[in-house]
């Protein structure tokens, strides 16, 4: 279902109208829509442009059944035609990143001097994270920003989503074939599909409670 008259939603409208949808129609999501969502997800920023997150797109009913098992029987993987698994890659910084730097250089975004400073600084920063046991946490941050992009881009297309934390990580890893990869973490699962329910905005607390100026002010 596309949004009314196919008029694109503004980012503000996508933010305001997105709801977590738990029940879905069986109608498939066009491959072109999924491709567009994945491309937009990869536009999300990442720390040091490490792009240390990947997404596994699950449409095969047998794999979705596995995700149903991993989520303790939540309805989303049973009903939504598409499940996304956001994978955080805590060791991506150790891989060769020459392609990233070459691309930025060719695009005229980063000159040679900046590339050499940036790549060395990124490695040093990541080493510091490794010493403090924070690599996973930082890769998960990057994966979550990509997930937020997907939720809004899906809303723009009239598609519903549900972010999901309710799963067993070892089970999810097994289902997507990475049970032997301690370097990889599951950041989030997300269903995508055509809504079979209309959700009412559950509301948010007043801005006074969570927005502060200059200093955090809640005891
Ligand atoms: C990180 C994260 C994990 C969530 N996990 C689940 C989940 O496992 N199952 C579920 O039904 N909803 C899940 N939710 C949805 C929240 O319950 C929902 O976002 C919240 O109630 C506010 O509703 P709204 O998204 O419609 O504004 C999750 C949301 C977030 C942000």
Image (cartoon, rainbow, N blue to C red):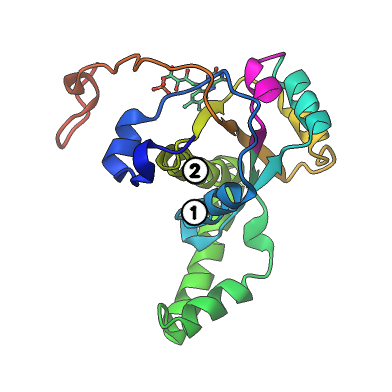
Q: Is residue 61 above or below residue 12?
A: above
Q: Quadrant of residue 140 in the image?
A: top right
Q: Is residue 83 magenta?
A: yes
Residue 188 in the figure: left or right of residue 15: right
Mark 1, residues whose alpha carbon is within 10 Å: few (<14), some, or many (≥20)?
some
Which corner quadrant holds the C terminus? top left
Nearer to the camera, 90 or 66: 66
1 and 2 marks in contact (CB < 8 Å):
yes
> Mark 1 — residue?
40
Q: Is residue 9 magenta?
A: no
Residue at x 54% of width, y 19% of height: 196
Residue at x 29% of width, y 37% of height: 13
Residue 179 in the figure: left or right of residue 55: right
Residue 179 in view in this figure? yes
* SS assignment at label 1: helix
> Mark 2 — residue?
150
Q: Position of residue 216 (x, y in %)?
A: 22, 29
Q: Give the magenta part as a residue range.
A: 73-84
Nearer to the camera, 108 or 58: 58
Q: Which mark is residue 129?
A: none
Residue at x 42% of width, y 84% of height: 111
Q: Is residue 133 above or below residue 16?
A: below
Q: Is mark 1 within 8 Å of ligand 1?
A: no
């Amino acid at each position: 279902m596309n949004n009314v008259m196919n008029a694109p939603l503004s980012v503000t409208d996508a933010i305001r109208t997105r709801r977590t949808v738990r029940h879905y129609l069986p109608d498939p999501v066009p491959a072109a829509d999924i491709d567009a969502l994945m491309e937009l997800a990869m536009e999300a920023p990442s720390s040091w442009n490490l792009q240390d997150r990947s997404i596994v797109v699950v449409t095969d009913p047998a794999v979705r059944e596995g995700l149903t098992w991993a989520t303790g029987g939540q309805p989303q993987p049973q009903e939504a035609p598409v499940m996304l698994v956001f994978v955080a890659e805590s060791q991506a910084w150790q891989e060769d990143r020459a392609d990233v730097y070459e691309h930025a250089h060719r695009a005229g975004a980063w000159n040679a001097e900046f590339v050499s400073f940036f790549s060395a600084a990124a490695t040093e920063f990541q080493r510091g994270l490794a010493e403090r046991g924070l690599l996973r946490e930082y890769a998960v941050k990057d994966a979550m920003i990509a997930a937020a992009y997907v939720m809004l881009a899906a809303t723009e297309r009239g598609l519903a989503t549900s972010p999901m934390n309710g799963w067993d990580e070892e089970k999810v890893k097994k289902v997507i074939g990475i049970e032997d990869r301690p370097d990889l973490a599951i950041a989030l699962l997300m269903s995508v599909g055509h809504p079979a329910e209309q959700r009412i905005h559950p509301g948010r607390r007043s801005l006074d409670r969570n927005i502060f100026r200059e200093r955090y002010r809640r005891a």
